[in-house]
């Protein structure tokens, strides 16, 4: 029983000085977010850059909704990776599957959190969204499919996937032993048990895949079903949301995996093979999204009705051109970076990570362009065009959410191995 | 049950914006909120120009996009056709606002008492105002705006109630339930606005709609508005708005 005295690998329970510094920094960022939220709760949403559509010439939704969409999008990575590992037997991706699942769970929590500051009456929101829920509202799908269904399914998968490692961790005496025991919930690693486990997680991941598509589509429907907002009312909205979700999710997963590899020195588990796979996945998704953008461009410039054309002009050449062309450049650069590596079959970690970062820059930019221009430039009555620029309160709250998510990620990685424990020593 | 509708005669409207003013006083709406708004349009090139005016209340649509999207049922259709907002239910997500093609929703971005034209809480203001108002109830204290209405007994009248909720034109539900006309209709000096029951063939609105050609705004959006326009035409690309109100909170 040598395993009993061996410490749990991958930095669990160990805190270096640098890590403490990072945690303090994250706490400071969160405190900033809390202060911004406090300001907003006392003063009202007037401290944001949001204003009424119409005579006030503003945008009623802004950064909060854009990042809500972003966070839900990021959650794409976890389940996709996990499902690919299980269904297509891509065993070399095993090492990132827990990282990806955790990313899904945390980003879904952040998505729920980023809606709350957008509400004028957040406390009412928490109660009434359940008490008076209306299935006819596209928001309903966001809460049931995404938060309830998707998050719950992800948590179940996460739990099943972690039982073996929890059982291994539970062999070691320590303050968290009860937690590992609870998670392992009687897992012994017998052949029969593993076979059953395998079957359960296979069917679960198979069931989650359609849920994934529906969940991201539902979010697209929040916008795509609004006939009153030119630029939103489009059947392309739902599929484009699914693809862009993949772009940002896989991109962020690459970045996180690279950081984990560096910090934990897990070069033996997070092999170049893992990054090659993730990079190629990102390349395919970026290519698909670029295709959507070209289709969008052609439709909008060739034969758009006048109201649609006004929005496209604002996006392509007007007020939003900076954000638009930055996003396009980032996506194209990410694709070219990956494609060159793919053609030469020589992969470099730094380039794959850069592509992941660029993909996320583009994803954030595109989300802003989906949410804002249709409100400021999409009036069907002849209101003058509006403006929207976020204030420090909005930036503060969003940064605080990122801080919170990162802290949750770090905290989890300190109580549970973030990478699946290696095969050897399982049958102890 | 009545089937209420508004008829706006564009041939009569002179763009005086008395309806906007009446609405503000009646409903106690905060600054920069225009439940009734009058567009002033200019068309053509000098010297062949034409100026015309178009009042824009809430359209109280029969197929209202705002009602469809409300996640908690705060926005609802009354049996008499009024589209109401329950400010005790609203969570302030502003989905109705982004869904509405007409831009009629206004959100209380700050505490309404900090966003009124006069600081009613200021004692000195009171000393100045009391002789003017002869001790009459100021709009912000109008008890009618706090009462519940309709068989469902929900509080839907007036504006400036609390921060973080959506408000919009109510067709002056508190006046209509008493048998009065909405404030904008009652105060139009040129009888350009009419309000009444479409199910009553003898009502003014029914008569006008029978007699004269009319249109509704953005009918192509399928919203089936309850506000009908007589005379003129819907605004198009050629209609430039002049003297736009650009008040921001």
Image (spheres, grey):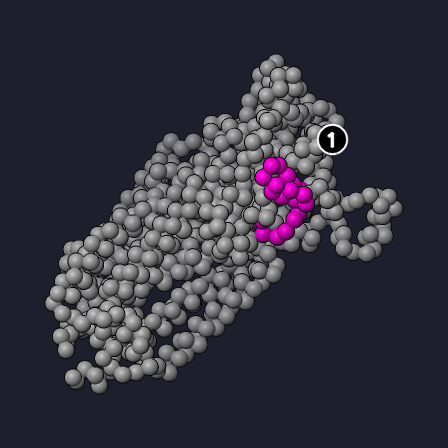
Can see residue A260? no
Answer with the quarter of the image where residue A263 lies: bottom left
Q: Residue at x 59, y 56 (%)?
A: A44
Q: Which class describes the residues within 10 Å of circle 1: few (<14), some (14-19), or many (20+)?
A: some
Location of mark 1 (residue): B187
B185 to the left or right of A143: right
Q: Position of residue B236 (x, y in %)?
A: 53, 28
Answer with the quarter of the image where residue A184 lies: bottom left
Callout 1: residue from which chain?
A: B
Residues shaded magenta: B146-165
Residue A131's place in the image compared with A253, above or below, is above
Q: Position of residue B8 (x, y in %)?
A: 63, 25
Q: Residue at x 16, y 70 (%)?
A: A189
Answer with the quarter of the image where residue A308 lies: top left
Residue B133's place in the image compared with B113, above or below, is above
Q: Position of residue B148 (x, y in %)?
A: 64, 42
Check the image and name the residue furthest to the top: B211
Give the secondary structure at mark 1.
Answer: helix
Residue A135's place in the image compared with A428, above or below, is above
Can see residue A167? yes
Q: Residue at x 52, y 46 (%)?
A: B94
């Amino acid at each position: 029983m040598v395993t009993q005295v061996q410490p749990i690998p991958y930095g669990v329970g160990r805190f270096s000085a640098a890590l403490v510094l990072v945690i303090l920094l994250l706490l400071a960022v969160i405190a900033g977010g809390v202060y911004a939220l406090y300001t907003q709760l006392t003063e009202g949403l007037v401290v944001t850059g949001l204003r009424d559509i119409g005579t006030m010439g503003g945008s009623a939704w802004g950064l909060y909704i854009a990042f809500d969409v972003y966070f839900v999008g990021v959650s794409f990575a976890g389940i996709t990776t996990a499902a690919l590992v299980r269904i297509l037997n891509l065993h070399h991706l095993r090492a990132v599957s827990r990282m990806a699942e955790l990313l899904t769970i945390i980003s879904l929590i952040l998505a729920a959190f980023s809606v709350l500051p957008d509400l004028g009456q957040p406390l009412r929101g928490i109660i009434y969204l359940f008490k008076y829920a209306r299935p006819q509202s596209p928001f309903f799908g966001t809460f049931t499919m995404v938060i309830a269904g998707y998050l719950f399914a992800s948590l179940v998968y996460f739990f099943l996937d972690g039982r073996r490692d929890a059982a291994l961790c539970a062999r070691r005496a320590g303050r968290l032993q009860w937690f590992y025991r609870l998670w392992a919930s009687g897992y012994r690693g017998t052949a029969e048990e593993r076979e059953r486990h395998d079957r359960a997680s296979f069917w679960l991941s198979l069931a989650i895949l359609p849920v994934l598509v529906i969940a991201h589509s539902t979010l697209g429907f929040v916008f795509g079903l609004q006939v009153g907002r030119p630029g939103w009312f489009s059947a392309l909205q739902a599929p484009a949301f699914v693809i862009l979700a993949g772009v940002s999710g896989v991109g962020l997963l690459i970045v996180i995996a690279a950081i984990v590899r560096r910090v934990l020195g897990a070069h033996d588990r997070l092999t170049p093979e893992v990054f090659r796979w993730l990079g190629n996945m990102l390349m395919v998704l970026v290519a698909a999204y670029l295709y959507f953008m070209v289709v969008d461009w052609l439709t909008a410039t060739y034969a758009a009705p006048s109201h649609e054309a006004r929005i496209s002009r604002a996006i392509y050449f007007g007020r939003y051109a900076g954000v638009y062309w930055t996003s396009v450049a980032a996506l194209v650069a990410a694709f070219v970076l990956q494609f060159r590596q793919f053609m030469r079959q020589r992969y470099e970690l730094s380039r794959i990570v850069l592509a992941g970062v660029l993909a996320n820059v583009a994803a954030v930019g595109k989300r802003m362009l989906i949410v804002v221009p249709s409100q400021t430039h999409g009036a069907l009555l002849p209101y003058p065009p509006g403006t929207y620029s976020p204030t420090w309160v909005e930036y503060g709250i969003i940064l605080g959410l990122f801080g919170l998510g990162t802290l949750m990620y770090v905290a989890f990685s300190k109580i549970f191995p973030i990478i699946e424990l290696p095969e050897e020593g399982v049958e102890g | 049950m009545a089937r209420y509708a508004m008829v706006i005669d564009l041939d009569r409207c002179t763009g005086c914006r008395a309806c906007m003013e009446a609405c503000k006083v009646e409903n106690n709406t905060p600054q920069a909120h225009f439940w009734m708004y009058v567009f002033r349009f200019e068309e053509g090139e000098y010297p062949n120009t034409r100026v015309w005016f178009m009042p824009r209340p809430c359209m109280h649509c029969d197929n209202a996009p705002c009602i469809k999207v409300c996640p908690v049922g705060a926005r609802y259709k009354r049996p008499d056709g009024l589209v109401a907002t329950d400010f005790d239910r609203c969570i302030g997500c502003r989905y109705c606002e982004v869904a509405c093609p007409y831009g009629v929703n206004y959100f209380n971005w700050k505490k309404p008492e900090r966003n009124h034209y006069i600081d009613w809480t200021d004692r000195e203001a009171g000393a100045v105002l009391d002789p003017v108002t002869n001790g009459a109830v100021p709009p912000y204290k109008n008890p009618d705006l706090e009462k519940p209405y309709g068989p469902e007994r929900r509080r839907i009248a007036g504006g400036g109630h609390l921060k973080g909720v959506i408000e919009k034109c109510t067709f002056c539900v508190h006046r209509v339930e008493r048998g009065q006309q909405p404030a904008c209709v009652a105060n139009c000096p040129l009888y350009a606005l009419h309000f009444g029951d479409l199910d009553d063939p003898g009502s003014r609105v029914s008569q006008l709609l029978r007699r004269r050609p009319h249109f509704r705004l953005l009918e192509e959006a399928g919203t089936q508005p309850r506000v009908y326009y007589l005379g003129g035409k819907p605004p198009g690309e050629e209609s430039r708005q002049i003297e736009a109100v650009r008040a921001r909170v």
